Amino acid sequence: SLFLVASITLSCTSIKTEPQEMQRGTMDTISYFSTTTGVDRRALVYTPPAYDAGKKYPVVYVMHGIGGDENEWQRNANPQATLDHLIADAKAVPFITVFPNGRAMNPDNVPSNPFTSEAVAAFAAFTDDLFNDLIPYMEATYSISSDRTKRAICGLSMGGGQALNIGLGHPESFAYVGAF
């Protein structure tokens, strides 16, 4: 399935050499207003090669670990190249990937101690931010299917815990859930 291929491949660190003719997707930083925190928040969004706003795409929300933010996956892996290869090798259908900051707090940054009660509470607050702010923003801005069978959430470490809590707690919203 889309989710299993994406989660297994995102956790891999070796990427084959990219041929020049391979189409590439786009990785952009977006900003959306969060009613949950009262401030603008950021996320990275991968759109597949030949993104077509007239087509509805599946979406995967990928969560980071406790000390990370929306840039964690890009800092420590190469998700754009991985996703490009999955699609180019026909191992996955084209899909949109969202890398949010899973800590919904004001200010919207990584605290020096991510284990304070305020920082830990911000991980729980992300559920409200996701459903009230980020998903509506993504569906209004990108051509994303709102069908739960086309939506996945996964994450690493603390983000894996978030993915399990959010995804299993909201089966009406997520058909695929994964933690690693």
Image (cartoon, rainbow, N blue to C red):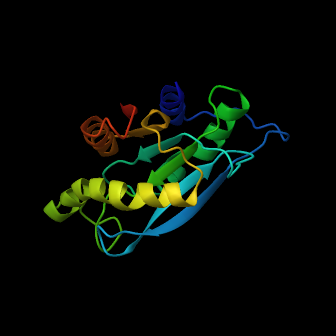
Give left or right: position of 42 versus 15: left
- Which picture quadrant has residue 154? top left
- Which picture quadrant has residue 175? top left
Of 131 and 107, the residue lying toward us: 131
The residue sitting at the left extreme is: 117
Evaluate whether residue 77 shows in this view: yes
Depicted 147 relative to depicted 33: above or below? above
Give left or right: position of 7 versus 156: right
Evaluate whether residue 115 shows in this view: no
The residue sitting at the right extreme is: 21
Depicted 176 relative to depicted 157: above or below? above
Measured from the top left, where is residue 151 in percent x and y?
Answer: 46, 39
Measured from the top left, where is residue 63 in percent x and y?
Answer: 39, 47
Measured from the top left, where is residue 67 in percent x and y?
Answer: 33, 55
Residue pictured at 52% horizontal, 53% vertical: 75
Residue pictured at 62% horizontal, 38% vertical: 82
Give left or right: position of 174 versus 18: left
Depicted 42 relative to depicted 177: above or below? below
Measured from the top left, where is residue 93 in percent x and y?
Answer: 63, 32
Total label count?
0
Of 51 and 120, the residue lying toward us: 51
Quarter of the image for the C terminus: give it: top left
